[in-house]
Image: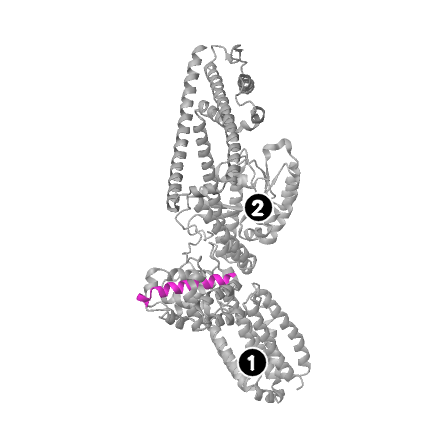
Amino acid sequence: MDFDSPEEKEFPGLYASEAIDSKSKKSKEESDFSEGDHDKHSKKDLLIGRRKDKKDKGKDRGYAALEGESSPEEELDTKSPSKSKKSKTFKFTSSKSKEKREKSRDKEKEPKALEEEPPQKAKEKEREKEKDRHHDEKEHKKKDKERKEKDKKDKFEKKDKKDKKSKQLQQEDASEVEEVLALGYPIFGVSISLATERSRCHDGIDLPLVVRDCIDFLQQEQSLKCDHIYKVEPIKTRLLHYKRLYNNRDNDASVDDIPTACSLLKLFLRELPEPVLTTDLVARFEEVASHPKVTDQQTELQQLLEQLPKCNRTLLSWILLHFDAVIQQERYNKLNAQSLAMLLSPTLQMSHRLMVVLLCHCTNLFPDVKLIKYVPPLTSSSPGLPDNPEDIKTELRKQDSLLTQIHSEMNAGFITKKREEQLWEVQRIITQLKRKLRSCEKKQEKSIDELEHTTAAPPAPAQASQSAAQPTEQIPPTTNQSTVTAPIVSEDTIDSVPTHTVTSLQQHDETNIATSPPPIEYTVDKQTGYLLLSKSNPQRDDLLRLQIEYDELMNWQNELKTRILAERNEIFRMKQLYEQELLKAQAAPTISQEQLPAEGDYERIIEHYTRENALLEHKKQMLGMEIKEERRACIALQVELRMQEF
Amino acid sequence: MSKKPTAGPALHKVIMVGSGGVGKSALTLQFMYDEFVEDYEPTKADSYRKKVVLDGEEVQIDILDTAGQEDYAAIRDNYFRSGEGFLCVFSITDDESFQATQEFREQILRVKNDESIPFLLVGNKCDLNDKRKVPLNECQVRAQQWSVPYVETSAKTRENVDKVFFDLMREIRSRKTEDSKATSGRAKDRCKKRRLKCTLL
């Protein structure tokens, strides 16, 4: 037949390229992928029609099977991961020979008998058979071709088989779909980034949860010191059980024995479609590892690591640091870098040498990576929410991250009862956390308010003195220029300032008084300009005291101002003197050199004086403070004295 | 959470929907904690649970307070799917919010695919009757069209707040008993669908 040879080339090639696609794409939307896949099938279906007309029996069966597949189950089918696709495609490519057909016919009978069995078992068997078929097919391919041409009489038989097969496929699909739905999107056998995204650690460290859990468990001291670590094989069913749990995101109970934890971690690494060091870079890593100079290795490794995708780097850093922790306990577990690399380098798809090199450099390569034990987000069964605002915030971040993941998974169609329940639960915890945080913040605000109130409670003297103390520093520049020529402040200015400010105080007080409802009678003391309330007013004394105190403080301020001005003039004078001296010194530079004492003495003297100066500076500050306090006490007394006058 | 009523008290899941600023959160907080929050802070999504006595029977109510703003429409579907009853809130002082209820109703029906889902149309802010923009009869007409009850509430004065939640819970409860009867009774495909729904919620 004319069509046979080209098609046969085309047929497996088609699927092979798809299989590769599925790996290299690593796209989140495997559903998309399988839709694409399905499109191709339907195109094929169209072709089938034509070929049937041409009585191309050799192909018929395979296409018939495809027809079966693209029938009612297609919707469900779109969700099946690429893996199961691949296994199916093997079957179709395989169905080419007469022998083959006979064999498969026999086999088809078996699965039908087995259909009553639990779907998984049946499916596994089915897969094994598919493999067998595939194997057989390769062997007999050539013979098959020849025979196929003679097979015209088998046509009717084939049609029967076609029906059977499509039925069987439907059933198979149904059982597969059940499992696939439970699986959702696997995390084993997909790229690191995808696995990380699908099972996040919600504390901001981008590792797939399974890796984190295993490392957490193995990082415990008793695990590291156990001499079973990375040596003993686990119970197979147990390992697969955990794999399924993680694939289903159902891992309430994390791994609790060393061999399973080790093997689960290894399994994850082994099933990665690409080495951790990536296919592109792994060769360059190997190159560096064979570099003779150890010091160069590190910088080059560092450069290569920079080029790795972030999640690969994180994963690599964690496993390497963990392995390093393992070999640190060589005394107990009898594993050193060499022997551990022997055990694990195949899993990591790197050479023994490279792994040893990486282990040797890992602490320097990842100085800021710390293996922190993962604390998963709280659930409703957790004892209680944190109380500390900081803890609440970190917990809130975790819960938010979890919520985002649930939403994105649900949007992607991964919806189970459990997920929906979790969604409400997480939402509820977030709400509670937010409320708690808000009440914490309110409490804080309140306490701050209270603090401010208590400090403001004895306000009169403290505030007044503060407000007086501040101007002493701020006001000079403005008055400066006008008084530079006359260092001693005239009495006029002293007088004018207080009177002016008293009026402003009056205004201030008036506004204060204005807010209190009853009209207030007051007189102005002509001599001092003080406001005097009527004797019956209880605030009379307070107001008077404040006014007197204000006056005193203003006096002090002015006094200080005059002193500052005097000092500035002194500074100016000294500067001029210094400049004159400097000019003189430049004119006769040799003298100073002669006066220099021996160098050792000189240093000692400098040291002595700097120390002395520091001491003096400190003393000066203390005295300054004392003076201030004394002055304040003086003012208080002065105020009391003058109070007596009224 | 939605474990079948065998374990613990029955759980009814209520979802608040409506435009932004109509008072969904205010109603919820008033119901939950007897507090009225004056300051407006847009909700993204909040969920609450409370034990209440419904006609002498202790039940739990899960309230999901959703975002009114369109920005969060994408995550709404996920919540709607698991809701058992809906309070569709608008403000009687804001005509746009009333018009928007139509869209919310449609979205809910689309997700739930069930015309008779427990549903209440709620006109909030009835303490601001002097600023009313949506005439009472218009609201009643719409409620009739949808064949759902119409209630006016005030989160501020607490008027009818308990009523809307309890009325809705009663509807959910009667709906559930209906469904369980249906599953134990005839009409096999119907009950299959129902059962699926029931367990799903």
Per the image, the residue denoted by label 1 is A94
Q: Amino acid at mark 2?
A: Ala
The number of numbered badges drawn on the structure is 2
Foreground pick, A325 / B151: A325
The answer to whether residue B185 shows anywhere in this view is: no
Q: Nearer the viewer, residue A29 or B93?
A: A29
Residue A63, numbered label: none
Location of residue A282 in the rendering, given as x and y in whole percent from the top left corner: 50, 70
The magenta stretch spans which residues? A310-333
- SS category of the residue bearing label 2: loop
As drawn, A585 above or below A318: above
Please state, as top left, top right, bottom left or bottom right, where the N terminus of chain A lies in the image: bottom right
Q: Which residue is mark 2?
A: B67
Give percent across and percent down for residue B185: 51, 56
* Residue A401 falls left or right of residue B124: left
The image shows residue B78 at horizontal and vertical percentages of: 55, 53
Q: State whether discs 2 and 1 lie on one chain.
A: no
Predominant SS along the magenta part: helix
Say which residue appears at 46% left-offset and 30% top-offset. A452
Name the colour scheme.
one colour
